[in-house]
Amino acid sequence: MAKIQVYYGTGAGKTSAALGNAIKAVGNGSSVIIIQFLKGMLDEDFIQRLEPEIRAFRFERSVSCFRELSEEEKVEEKQNILNGLNFAKKVLTTGECDVLVLDEVLGLVDEGLIKEEELVEIMKSGFPSTQLIATGTKLPEGIREAADQVLQIVSEK
């Protein structure tokens, strides 16, 4: 099992792959937490139905995807996103779960909300037995180096 696993790319299915791993982990008796970033409330209903086996969190308040927000709305959401990251740090450092999925967390670097080095530090801060799964479209080199396993999702047609 890779301690830090990353799904990235322009193809659809990164979140689905991460959820598949989360469901498999629950089936093996592991505890799972998912924290979603930048997505709006598109997938929220489905993910909420997985509780209590998979605990899901979304700290943003907007219904819309982050990229669709006005600059003023983005400023408001930034603090909510940082609260989500702080929660992720707590989960990782305390070993609160066996598997932590940070859905679309790579987009935080792309959007300029956090620095690549900050995300690498968060990813490496994990409790020794906690598996981290991160998803996003673009993969910064520092994240690639920190990961134990990297899977690129592309669409051929």
Image (spheres, helix red, strand yellow):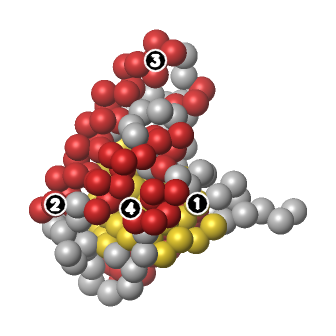
Residue type for callout 4 = Val
Query: Residue beneath label 4, please?
Result: 101
On residue 73, the disc is 3
* Res 83 quadrant in image: top left
Of residue 35 and residue 49, the one placed in the foreground of this image is 35
* Res 147 quadrant in image: bottom left
- Residue 157 in the image, given as x and y percentages of width and height: 87, 63
Instruction: State left or right for residue 66 relative to residue 99.
Output: right
Residue type for callout 1 = Tyr
Label 1, label 3: how many angstroms apart (C-alpha)? 26 Å
**Label 1 with label 3: CB-CB less than 8 Å:** no
Label 4, label 2: how many angstroms apart (C-alpha)? 14 Å
| Crowd class of label 4 (few under 14; some 14 to 19; many from 20; radius 10 Å) | many
Q: Residue at x 45, y 58 (%)?
A: 143
| Crowd class of label 2 (few under 14; some 14 to 19; many from 20; radius 10 Å) | some
Q: Residue furthest right?
A: 157
Instruction: State left or right for residue 52 relative to residue 96.
Output: right
Label 3, label 2: how many angstroms apart (C-alpha)? 31 Å
| Crowd class of label 1 (few under 14; some 14 to 19; many from 20; radius 10 Å) | many
Query: Residue beneath label 1, please?
Result: 8
